[in-house]
Image (cartoon, rainbow, N blue to C red):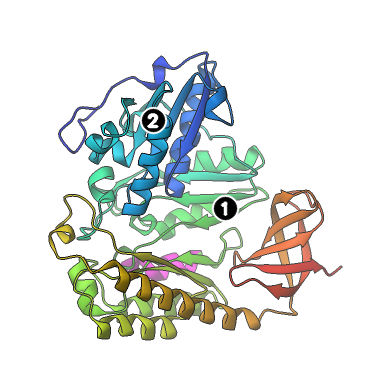
């Protein structure tokens, strides 16, 4: 076990000491963190533990942390303070790069997330609600000036295709109808081993079963060199026609200061290539507003970029300086400007989304039911991964044709058509 990247050695063998207990797990952050928590659960269940739904029931509490932005860090610290009187264990990104911040809130046992993978024995965590998670890589090849996750997760490490395929096969065999491939940068998979994501998706596309695969976040810098192979693989029936391409800014000057490694034009070229291979593909993106030094003109460039890109959803984040990152050395923009720019960005993004949705209203589409939202209401996913809420308790894994009767910006309302 390596030492943590902030110089403090992590505790070792912690998970193996938690046995025959009721355990509550709280997870913050991304799909990759959710995958880690599911692996923690699988390890503990093999050790005779029982998972419970509240800390009050638990003899041990595990918090899997995230620190990607300041607001999330503050939320985690509030949670840690509220749990400080429990038998508390902490892991995740904060455990690696912000140990002192954890100890300022509580006095837990801290363990490195690498221990999760060392303790876990495949194949396959049980899917939650028929949705499975497969981690295909960790870390990244980038050097974004604002990002603390790179320090926490380290350089790119791609997991072997055989291991990934076994996980997919296991989850499909356990009844997963949606399998999410995740990593800090999914399109970088294989770049450290002479392979690429397109080759992996082609193999996954041949796995039998009643499921579809959602491919996770892909960085334009690593996707561009392999975009033809990856976009071609997205045409397979097994892969949802959906991609998440976080551009962060539409201004080349801001992208250069961020250290993103691509231009706005290159990001648009990727989008055009995917739409050529997969007409109607759904596109999500991320934008950071109020990055240090962002001028009004640069902000307007991002708005214009989104108009050209035409994403179906934009995740808008206000910039927050993260400890020991290069961007944190620069003067932060007053929060009132960031709030106003985020409001304008969200309104602009929602207008684009609603405009794109209009073309779908009245259409009949085939959906794969992935979950029961609540009694009498089911969630289905189109081939393009659009969420469709349908009345009735339709079993996950079933397919049905529905007519899209309404939209709620980021999902649709549908009714059985046949």
**Neighbour tally class for label 1: few under 14, some 14-19, many 20 plus, Cα within 10 Å:** few
Relative to residue 344, is residue 141 depicted above or below?
above
Q: Which residues are magenta?
A: 223-233
Q: Residue furthest right?
A: 418
Q: Position of residue 408 (x, y in %)?
A: 64, 71
Q: Position of residue 287 (x, y in %)?
A: 37, 69
Write the residue at 79% across / 52% down.
Answer: 394
Relative to residue 361, is residue 175 depicted above or below?
above
Label 2 to label 1: alpha-carbon separation: 29 Å
Please state which of residues 260 and 301 is positioned toward the viewer in this rendering: 301
In what element is the residue under mark 1?
loop
User: Could you say which quadrant of the image residue 28 lies in?
Assistant: top left
Write the residue at 78% across / 62% down.
Answer: 400
Which quadrant would the N terminus be assigned to in this image? Answer: top left
**Residue highlighted by disc 1:** 206
In what element is the residue under mark 2?
helix
Q: Position of residue 40 (x, y in %)?
A: 46, 30
User: Could you say which quadrant of the image residue 66 lies in?
Assistant: top left
Nearer mark to the viewer, of 2 and 1 = 2
**Residue highlighted by disc 2:** 116
Q: Is residue 113 magenta?
A: no
């Amino acid at each position: 076990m390596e030492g943590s990247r902030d110089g403090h050695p992590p505790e070792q063998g912690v998970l193996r000491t938690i046995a025959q207990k009721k355990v509550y797990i709280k997870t913050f952050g991304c799909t990759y963190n959710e995958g880690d928590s599911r692996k923690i659960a699988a390890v503990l269940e093999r050790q005779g533990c029982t998972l419970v739904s509240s800390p009050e029931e638990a003899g041990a509490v595990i918090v899997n942390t995230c620190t990607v932005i300041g607001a999330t860090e503050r939320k985690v610290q509030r949670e840690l303070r509220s749990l400080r009187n429990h038998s508390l264990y902490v892991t995740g990104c904060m455990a690696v790069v912000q140990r002192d911040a954890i100890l300022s809130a509580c006095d837990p046992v801290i363990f490195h997330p690498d221990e999760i993978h060392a303790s876990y024995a495949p194949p396959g965590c049980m899917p939650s609600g028929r949705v499975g998670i497969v981690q295909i890589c960790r870390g990244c090849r980038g050097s974004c000036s604002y990002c603390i996750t790179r320090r926490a997760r380290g350089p790119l490490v791609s997991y072997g295709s055989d291991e990934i395929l076994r996980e997919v096969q296991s989850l499909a065999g356990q009844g997963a109808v949606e399998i999410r491939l995740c990593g800090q940068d999914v399109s970088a998979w294989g770049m450290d081993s002479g392979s690429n994501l397109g080759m992996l998706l082609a193999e996954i596309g041949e796995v039998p079963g009643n499921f579809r695969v959602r491919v996770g976040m892909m960085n334009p810098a690593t996707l561009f060199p392999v975009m033809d192979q990856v976009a071609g693989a997205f045409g397979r029936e097994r892969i949802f026609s959906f991609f998440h391409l976080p551009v962060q800014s539409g201004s080349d000057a801001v992208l250069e200061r961020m250290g993103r490694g691509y231009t706005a034009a290159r990001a648009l070229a990727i989008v055009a290539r995917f739409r050529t291979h997969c007409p109607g593909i759904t596109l999500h993106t991320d934008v950071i507003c109020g990055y240090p030094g962002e001028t009004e003109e640069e902000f307007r460039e991002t708005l214009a970029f989104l108009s050209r890109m035409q994403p179906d959803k934009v995740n808008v984040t206000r910039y927050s300086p993260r400890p020991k990152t290069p961007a944190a050395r620069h003067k932060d923009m007053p929060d009132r400007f960031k709030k106003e720019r985020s409001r304008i960005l969200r309104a602009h993004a929602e207008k684009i989304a609603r405009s794109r949705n209009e073309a779908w209203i009245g259409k009949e589409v085939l959906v794969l039911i992935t979950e029961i939202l609540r009694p009498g209401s089911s969630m289905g996913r189109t081939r393009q991964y659009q969420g469709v809420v349908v009345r009735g308790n339709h079993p996950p894994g079933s397919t049905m044709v529905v007519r899209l009767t309404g939209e709620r910006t980021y999902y649709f309302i549908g009714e059985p058509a046949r």
